[in-house]
Amino acid sequence: MARIFAYIVHNGGVPDDTAAELPAAARKIDPAWAVTAIVTGWGANLDKLCESLSGTYQEIWKIAKEPLAHPNAELVRQALVSVLPAGSILLVPHAHFGVDLSPGLSIKMNSPYVPDVVDIEGMEGTWLKAVRQEFGGQISVHVRCNLATGAVLNIRPGAFRPADRVLGGGQVVDKSAEVGTLTARRRYLETIAAETGDVDITKEPVLISIGRGIGEQENVAIAEDLAEAMGAAVSCSRPVVDARWMDKSRQVGSSGQTVRPKVYLACGISGSFQHLAGIKGNPFIVAINKNPKAPIFRVAEVGIVDDMLEFLPALASRVREETSVAGKERRRS
Amino acid sequence: MDSIAEATYWLIRGRELFLFLHLLGLACFAAIAARRLAPLLRAERDFRFDRPLARLGKLVQFWLAQWRHPRYRLAGVLHILIFAGFLLLASRAFTVLAMGLSDRFIDTGSGGFYGIVRHYATTVVFLCMGTAIVRRLVFRPARYGRPSADPIFLLSLIAILMAADGVFEGSQAAMHAQAGPAEFLAPWSLAWICQSAFAGAALATLRNLHLGAYLAHEFTFFFLLCYRPFGIQFHVETSLFSIYFAKLDRGTVKPVRWGVADQQLDTVPSFGVKKLEDFTWKHILDFYSCADCGRCAEQCPANAAGRPLSPRALSIKSRDYVFRHYPVWGPSSDGTPLVGGLYSEDEIWSCTTCGACEAECPLLVEYIDKIVDLRRGLVDDGKAPQPLHKPLKALEGRGNPFGKLEKKRADWAQGAVPIANGGGVETLFFADSITSYDDRAQSIGRAVARILGRLGGNFGILGAKERDSGHDVRRFGEETLFLALRDHNTEAIRASGARRIVTADPHAFNALKHDYKDVPPVEHASQAIARAVRTGQIRMKPVENGVYTYHDPCYLGRHNGIYQDPRDVLDAIPGLRRVEMKRSRDRSFCCGGGGLALFYEAQEEQRMGVLRVRMAAEAGASVMVTACPFCLVNIEDAIKVAGMEGQMTAIDLAELVDRQMVS
Amino acid sequence: MEILVCAKRVPDTAENEIQLNRAGTDIERDDLVYSVNEPDNYAVEEALQIAARTGGKVTVVTVGGDEDEEVLRREMAMGAARGVLISDDAFQGSDGRGIAAILKAYVQSEHYDLILTGVQAEDGCAQVGGMLAAMLDYPFASLVTSIEVLDGRKLKIGREIEGGSKEINAIDLPCVLSIQTGINEPRYVGMRGIRQVASVPIPTLGAADLGLGPDAAGEAAAKVKRVDYFVPPAGKGAEMLQGSREEIMEKLMDLLKAKGGLN
């Protein structure tokens, strides 16, 4: 079997969550799941990264070149093409960097490219059968490609749960010398960080969103409390802004902000199409509403018929209980 | 000694001096009027020369009888007095001018009935000027805005004109009184007061007063004549025309270009108003005619909600724009774009076309057609606001702004209403988009269906073949899409074989009545229900509690004059306590708008609906009854936003009747 | 500057309910409303704004059949100077790589300084832009949210990255960029605008015109093949949690942990 490689996305040496998920995906391709991590970067951060991956990967190929200090898909591609053996299967997380890197990489590697894989069913000979989604997740698709000449597979973050059993080891193999001079026709200049100060809901991965059901200004605190417990932020629908209970910058919707969270708790929100238009990226939506017929239940994945003014405080204390327990467990292990 | 014509003013004989001054004044006025006319000649055409009898009728009602003025009681009465005064004094003015040229006009009309009328008219106008100035300076009604110098200046000038006449005549009578029996001056008129005041003066002094008053009159008269076209007082001249040429056809919107049929619109290179000369001459005349009285702005719901729209401000700044680009002295400049400079886009999109401004304006200035034309221009340039792109695209693709499937359009009827498929249907119930697809509004459709069933006769719906009536598509400037929707619906309606149409949606009602051609006559559900209630075909059981108030939907009430039918229906319900909001009938306050107005999110301080719900509470009501699905949806929404759930509910008239009907 | 925008005609996800057809081989296409892929529309608007600033022309190209012409007309109504349709039976069933190969042949037959695509279409693959760039050996950037034209055949672009931050890059021309929605506010195009360009000719190019052999693209050449469509087991509508408040809360906690809702 061709070697399976997992490209590790990291931020200053801290690996992304997907680093732990890619081996689970690899396991579904090759049950023997010998997957090698491949990391690019420069300096102490890169070494720190290899260190933190040692628990998840047996072997880590390190490419350290100064031009790779800031991730640049064009340069990473050149590096990978120099280093990867023919017929390699490369797993990349399907996110901002993966979308930039993989299509062009698959052309230069002369291998098929399957983007945004949400599940892998297995092999039939040299053909891989995988699952994708189309139309914003409304429909699923089985696809197949021949891995004989290798492949680039972009894996959707969060689609594969990290394997429970990990074969660590973390042997670092330095491949930097195999990469020649890197020439860039696209050059990194700077990063403009997201606005801080008051919360920017467009950047929040978890949102507690409140609607008219919050009832009055004083009750907004209930949502803020839950958000604090969950490490989330509070957003809202238009009626809450109209009533002046929250600032306009917190409004999700066609006339407010567009958010792309991972998890969206819609509390006391009826689910008008103007509001839903502001939610992109197909997050996990939990709807909590007194009215079982609220349209939001058609769009949410999970629905709870209850009074948000009672449910949210209960949830907040439950969450606090959980995070303190988890904290204790982590410290124990 | 009375003669002005023969008098000497600093070595110049009166006759020559005043001939010169009269001619100078008239020439100036003519030149100014010509410059004011110039933009009208370059503007778009407007077909307003038809139906002279109807137009004369409007002139009598609104110009002569000042029909609209008493809506604001004190200001209205003042203005009626001033206007009556002006009419009565018209002949006096000319006589006085003529006196400067020939002695033949002296003593004309100083006695007799006209004399008395004239004396009091002058006095009343003078007093009205004083009252008006005091109102503006001391009481400051909000709609006049901050007190400014110009109106006070003009009011003062008119007062001076009246005073000059009083002094002129008083001094003359005083001179005569010293020589013999004095003429009769109406007691306590200005002239009479002046005569009393001058009684003991020397003849020479009186003569100087007499001549001086005449000169003052001359200058003031011609100054006013030439100054009026520079400000709001121009309405003195233009009101006759703005009212004669006023729009006769209520409820409809002007065509993209007069004289160009819908099928030929592809030949028109540019739609709508993008530069000044794209307005029609009547619209520019409207800008001239605005008296800045502020009544429209005070009634405008968008203005009350804090949106950047004020009808009066729109007229005044447009007028100033015309003056700047077509100055009396200097060359014209033209073609400068309006939106983005003079008007903001938000201003133009803020209007819900409720018509409150047009219903209030004493000069019959039109606003809706202008707003629609400006919107047409924006849409033509690709500047429809982003929140409207999606519903417009959905209307194009699916025939409804929600983007729901066409085949589900009849789902609201739950199979209980037959689809009118080619013939055999007497009455067509036109549901329109919101009643078909909105969860809340669908129950209105079902209620009407049950009522129509009770009334007998066969009726049906178009079902999946129905498209949005396009009423607000047109009023938001997308004329091409509107025409496509209209043509499709017209064909489907005619194919159904129906001989009459009923709808519960006032927007659809207005469209089918005024925008559509060649379709059977249409009536609103409230009219059919009212008829059935009067003939006893529908009887209703009593209502126990609640205080009900009826909210007049803009497109049922103001635009179509249907106010009483829904009230008759409510009054026929035994035990129903009904109160009237302060702003009702043609002063009804828009709920926030229907059609595409639902999707446009304006910059505002408050929702219109919230203001309306508070008005209902103020009137002591606990239930708001309305006869429009948009009003219902907006008002229910507003009740929640205002935090009045539990204190106020809303219900549609048809829903109420359906609930209370007994067999 | 000569700008090419690659557009695609797709079923409008917002207005359609995507369902499986009875045979289970495809989605039900009878009732679908099609329109231009939304990110492509943003790309055309961006191209028009750049062309207005620098002086230049915008060409819109699509690969498909006669029914795809309407997308070209809509973009021409928006202001694109030219629309080009690439159509050939041999191209049926192409995968993204095949489309990129076809577009590469077209680009090489003309001269373009800048090529824009939308970040992704209804299939969510987000691949044609990157593949096209690699085939042409042009530099590439995805998720572009701002473009500034610099002197010396360079652009300064902003890219959307994690956490809502923006990465600023300089990129040499000619290049390929994939455009993210929200980069601008596309102008409105109505029926009238489309009618005004109704009679402008749209050239159709086939495989022979582009010098492409029969196996350059098309179904046989596809490296990733679609097997079938199916409905994900969760179905539509929320899974309503049952039980007492405590039971519901436990289930919710599990779900939140799994979905990354607890930090």
Image: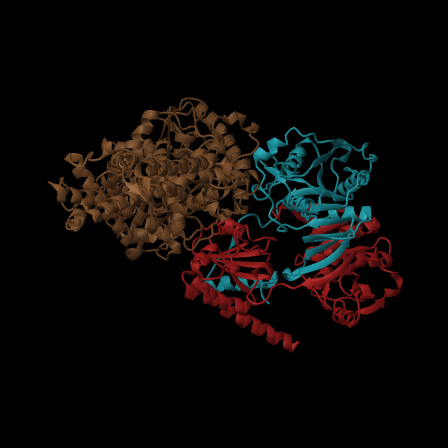
Chain colours: A red, B brown, C cyan
Residue A42 screen position, x and y as percent:
80, 68
Q: Is residue A108 left or right of residue B85?
A: right
Which of the image's four quarters has the C terminus of chain B?
top left
Q: Can I make out residue B394 in this image?
A: no
Nearer to the camera, B280 or C27: B280
Tell me if residue C93 comes above or below residue A318 in the rendering.
above
The structure residue drawn at horizontal position 61% and vertical position 31%, both measured from the top left corner, is C196
Q: Residue lying at the far left in this picture: please name it.
A: B181
The structure residue drawn at horizontal position 43% and vertical position 51%, both measured from the top left corner, is B307
Nearer to the camera, B95 or B608: B95
Tell me if residue A218 comes above or below residue C156 in the rendering.
below
The structure residue drawn at horizontal position 51% and vertical position 40%, both measured from the top left corner, is B404
Q: Residue lying at the far front in this picture: please name it.
A: B11
Residue B414 screen position, x and y as percent:
43, 37
Q: Can I make out residue A79 in this image?
A: yes
Q: Quadrant of residue A98?
A: bottom right
The structure residue drawn at horizontal position 38% and vertical position 32%, both measured from the top left corner, is B247
Nearer to the camera, C23 or A140: A140
Nearer to the camera, A52 or A27: A52
Which of the image's four quarters has the N terminus of chain B?
top left
Q: How many marks?
A: 0
Tell me if residue A64 comes above or below residue A116 in the rendering.
below
Q: Quadrant of residue B444?
A: top left
Q: Is residue B125 left or right of residue B346?
A: left
Residue C214 screen position, x and y as percent:
82, 34
Residue C253 screen position, x and y as percent:
55, 64
